[in-house]
Structures are given as structure tokens and as C-alpha cells.
């Protein structure tokens, strides 16, 4: 899952369940823009979702949980014949209001020893075909460290060399699979992770912080 070359989800238990929960939840995207925050449940084996509604000067926002469970802010791609994002540029602009310390799942443990601070990066997947690592893509290296207060811009061209898949492989290693996924996107958005992983979940403790997505453009 963009896990720096490791075929691991958040927990050591196999987590195909989490992917299925993500895809099922996406089918009921709320009408007001469709943005949802996906968070790991108590088992750590599946994701649950809830709307991330627009707010003051934002197209979507949510308050980070105290536990490092918030993994993905995403919406459904249009699904129309012209929904391909291949070759386009994605830019996400965000602000974080409040004050606190970001944590991420597995921080300081043998399960997640890399030490990269909690961060956010661009994400998309495709629903076409059976499970494959190359259905899920994260911008790499484009990312931003999370701080509260804080904010920033994450931008990447949807070209193979700027993304890596579930297994941490650069898109240039399988450009055809990358092109298929980018030509038929299902979910697009931002992921939250830290350490060795891109979507293992983050939280804020101590303190409190709200993520405000100011704009998300594909052009």
C-alpha cells in the first residue's frame, strides 16, 4: 500500500478486508461533494467512513482523532468516459488549524521502524479487475509533513515515475498497469501515514487539530 517496498497493510494481519471496506464505503459517497474520511476501526483490519463536509473556506474538513487511525480523505472519481487523470496534474492545498502533536500507527515500534514524520500525500485507485498491487497508487516523493497549526500544497503529475503502488514499486516498473489505473480512477484524494508506510493512519495527541482541504484540482 505504498509501503516502501513492503506488502503490508496497517496491521500484520492480512487486510484485504480494509480494501473491500474502502470500496464499499465509496459507493455511498455523500452528495455534498462526496468527500469522506476513512479511518481504521478498533480491530485495525478494516476502514470505516464518514462524510467530511465543506466548511469555512474549505471543500472538505474533519477533525483528527486522538488515536492514529485517520488514513484517507477521498471522493469518487466521476466515472464518466472523460474521467481519466493520466498525464494530468493533481494539486491539493490544505490548512491545519488547532495545536497538537501528530502521531502515526506503529511509531517507535519494530513493526514500523523508519521514523518518517506523519505526512500526507496524493492517492488514487481503480476498481477495475481483481485485487492487484497496481490498482492502488500514492504520490512518491510528493508529500507534506503534518504540523498543527500548519498547511501546504502537494502536487504531482500523473505520470509513472511520480507514483508508487501498494507494494512500494515505482510506476515506471509497470507503466501499462499504471496507465490502466489512472485512466479508470475510482477514488482520488489524500492519504495519511508515517514511518515506513503511506496510509497506516495518523492522529493528534496531545492537542486537537482540524484538516481543511482548501482545493483539490486535476487539470
Image: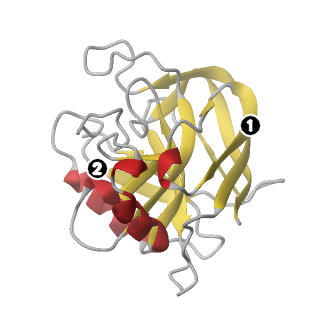
Q: Residues within 10 Å of mark 1 (few under 14, many from 20)?
A: some
24 sits left or right of 182 in the view: left
Image x and y of residue 213, in percent: 70, 50
Give me the disc on residue 152.
1
Q: Residues within 10 Å of mark 2 (few under 14, many from 20)?
A: many
Residue at horizontal 47 percent and vertical 73 percent from the top: 183
Q: Quadrant of the C terminus?
A: bottom right
37 sits left or right of 101 in the view: left
Give me the disc on residue 46.
2
Give me the disc on residue 45.
none
Image x and y of residue 114, in percent: 38, 17
Earlier along the polypeptide chain: callout 2 or callout 1?
A: 2
Image x and y of residue 15, in percent: 21, 47
> Is 139 located above or below residue 186 in the figure?
above
How many marks do you count on the picture? Answer: 2
**Which structural element holds mark 1?**
strand
* Whether residue 96 is visible: no
Residue furthest left in the image: 13
**185 and 160: which is toward the camera:** 160
**Which structural element holds mark 2?**
loop
How far is mark 2 from mark 1, CA to CA? 29 Å
* Whether residue 4 is visible: yes
Name the quadrant containing residue 128. bottom left
Residue at horizontal 30 percent and vertical 34 percent from the top: 5
> Is 197 located above or below residue 130 in the figure?
above
**136 and 101: which is toward the camera:** 136
145 sits left or right of 214 in the view: left
Amino acid at each position: 500500500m505504498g509501503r516502501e517496498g513492503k506488502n503490508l497493510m496497517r496491521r500484520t494481519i492480512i487486510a484485504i478486508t480494509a480494501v473491500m471496506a474502502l470500496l464499499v464505503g465509496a459507493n455511498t459517497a455523500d452528495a455534498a461533494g462526496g468527500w469522506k474520511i476513512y479511518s481504521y476501526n478498533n480491530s485495525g483490519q478494516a476502514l470505516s467512513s464518514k462524510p467530511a463536509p465543506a466548511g469555512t473556506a474549505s471543500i472538505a474538513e474533519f477533525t483528527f482523532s486522538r488515536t492514529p487511525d485517520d488514513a484517507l480523505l477521498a471522493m469518487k472519481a466521476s466515472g464518466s468516459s472523460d474521467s481519466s487523470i493520466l498525464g494530468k496534474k493533481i494539486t491539493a492545498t490544505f490548512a491545519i488549524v488547532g495545536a497538537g502533536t501528530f502521531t502515526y500507527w506503529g511509531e517507535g515500534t519494530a513493526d514500523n521502524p523508519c521514523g518518517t514524520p506523519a505526512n500526507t500525500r496524493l492517492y488514487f485507485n481503480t476498481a477495475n479487475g481483481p485485487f492487484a498491487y497496481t490498482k492502488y497508487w500514492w504520490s512518491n516523493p510528493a508529500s507534506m509533513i503534518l504540523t498543527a497549526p500548519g498547511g501546504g500544497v502537494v502536487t504531482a503529475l500523473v505520470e509513472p515515475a511520480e507514483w508508487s503502488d501498494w507494494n512500494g514499486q515505482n510506476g515506471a516498473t509497470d507503466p501499462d498497469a499504471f496507465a490502466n489505473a489512472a485512466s479508470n480512477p475510482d477514488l482520488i484524494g489524500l492519504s495519511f501515514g508515517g514511518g515506513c508506510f503511506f496510509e497506516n493512519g495518523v492522529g493528534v495527541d496531545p492537542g486537537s487539530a482540524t484538516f481543511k482541504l482548501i482545493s483539490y484540482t486535476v487539470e
